[in-house]
Every structure is written in structure tokens, then in C-alpha cells.
Image (cartoon, rainbow, N blue to C red):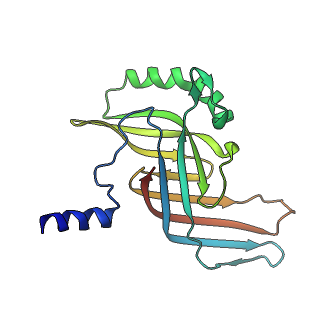
């Protein structure tokens, strides 16, 4: 009976109860499934807002190594060069910090699940690490393109505004909010 209860708990949580990222250079992927959505479209021609059906995509977020053997990683594209330029600044700022939080930057690729990997979607994101009595772990990651904030094995939020006031190529502009849950995957 005890084993059945353990199996049931693991089945519900996807086996992710104790999975955390504890090494700064650990490469991982997480799947983020939207459970809530709000979407608005503005039609310039009609000068009217509409609220189409909810859009609940699944995202894949992948941490990409910025360098391989000291050289920029081609898979990280321009993110690798930004990372190399900023690395020393972040390391020295964290060394003098006495808070339980440390902040670093790393390369991440955020994409919709069914789209193929494109290294131009890789960007330099902010990592927030928490120090505790059990050690250091990755608490949250914030990426700006799109405005995507996630916990590797927790919640996520996305806020997207596709808005250019004088763009005439597309008559619709979009504002979208998505929220949901992320789980580490292999």
C-alpha cells in the first residue's frame, strides 16, 4: 500500500518532486504548459478590440551553453558574445553580495513546442539563485524576448505585446498573457 501511494504521488507530479537545478553550468530543458490565457487583438482598419479564443501553447525552454572549450557556442548565436562580455561584471557583483540571492546571466532558447530550434531565438536571460542551508539552487529565470519568467520546475508567466504604432504591414496588433506550469524534461 505504501508503494502504491508513492507511485500515485510520483504519477501526479510527473516525478518532479525533488528535481532542482543546483549547478550554474547545468544544462537543462523544461516544458511549460499554458493553463490560463488572455488575448486581445486590435484591428487598425476597424479601430476595434476583439478577444479571440484562448491560445494555450506549450513552450520548450532550453539552457544553452554560451561557450564550449572557451570558444563561443554557435548554437547560442549572439548570446554567446554578450555572455562573454558581461560574465566578469556579474561574477564580481555576486562575490560582494551578502543577500541570500545571487544573480547571473545565461543563454536560453524559448520556443513554442512544435517549432524547430532556431539559434536566433537564443537570448541572454537573468537567473536568480537562492542560497539556503541545503545549498544553492536556481529559483527563477527572466527572459525579455518574449517577456517570459519561469521557475524550471514551477510556474511561468508570459506577457507579449506585438505593438508598433505605425506599422502598416499588419492590420492587427496583439496583446497576450499566458500562465501555467513548467516541468523539467530530458
Above or below: residue 59 compared with residue 41: above
Residue 67 in percent (x, y) is at 58, 27
Above or below: residue 186 compared with residue 131: below
Q: Residue at x 19, y 68 (%)?
A: 4
Answer with left or right where residue 135 lies relative to residue 150: left
Quadrant containing the N terminus in the rendered view: bottom left
| Quadrant of residue 171 within the rendered picture | bottom right
Above or below: residue 70 compared with residue 40: above
Q: Residue at x 35, y 37 (%)?
A: 22
Answer with left or right where residue 29 lies relative to residue 101: right
Above or below: residue 69 compared with residue 142: above
Residue 175 in percent (x, y) is at 64, 65
Residue at the limit of the structure toward the left, as seen here: 1
| Quadrant of residue 16 within the rendered picture | bottom left
- Closest to the observer: 155 or 64? 64
| Quadrant of residue 74 within the rendered picture | top right
- Closest to the observer: 50 or 157? 157
Q: How many marks?
A: 0
Residue at the limit of the structure toward the right, as seen here: 168
- Closest to the observer: 127 or 110? 110
Q: Residue at x 12, y 65 (%)?
A: 2
Q: Residue at x 33, y 48 (%)?
A: 19
Residue 70 in percent (x, y) is at 58, 20
Residue 104 in percent (x, y) is at 47, 32
Amino acid at each position: 500500500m505504501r508503494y502504491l501511494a508513492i507511485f500515485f504521488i510520483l504519477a501526479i507530479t510527473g516525478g518532479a518532486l525533488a528535481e532542482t537545478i543546483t549547478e550554474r553550468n547545468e544544462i537543462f530543458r523544461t516544458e511549460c504548459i499554458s493553463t490560463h490565457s488572455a488575448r486581445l487583438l486590435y484591428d487598425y482598419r476597424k479601430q476595434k478590440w476583439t478577444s479571440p479564443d484562448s491560445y494555450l501553447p506549450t513552450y520548450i525552454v532550453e539552457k544553452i551553453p554560451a561557450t564550449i572549450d572557451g570558444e563561443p557556442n554557435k548554437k547560442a548565436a549572439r548570446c554567446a558574445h554578450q555572455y562573454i562580455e558581461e560574465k566578469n561584471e556579474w561574477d564580481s557583483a555576486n562575490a560582494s553580495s551578502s543577500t541570500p540571492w545571487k544573480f547571473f546571466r545565461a543563454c536560453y532558447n524559448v520556443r513554442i513546442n512544435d517549432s524547430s530550434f532556431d539559434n536566433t531565438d537564443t537570448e541572454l536571460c537573468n537567473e536568480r539563485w537562492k542560497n539556503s542551508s541545503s545549498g544553492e539552487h536556481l529559483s527563477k529565470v527572466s527572459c525579455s524576448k518574449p517577456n517570459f519568467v519561469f521557475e524550471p520546475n514551477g510556474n511561468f508567466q508570459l506577457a507579449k505585446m506585438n505593438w508598433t504604432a505605425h506599422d502598416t504591414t499588419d492590420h492587427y496588433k496583439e496583446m497576450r498573457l499566458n500562465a501555467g506550469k513548467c516541468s523539467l524534461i530530458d
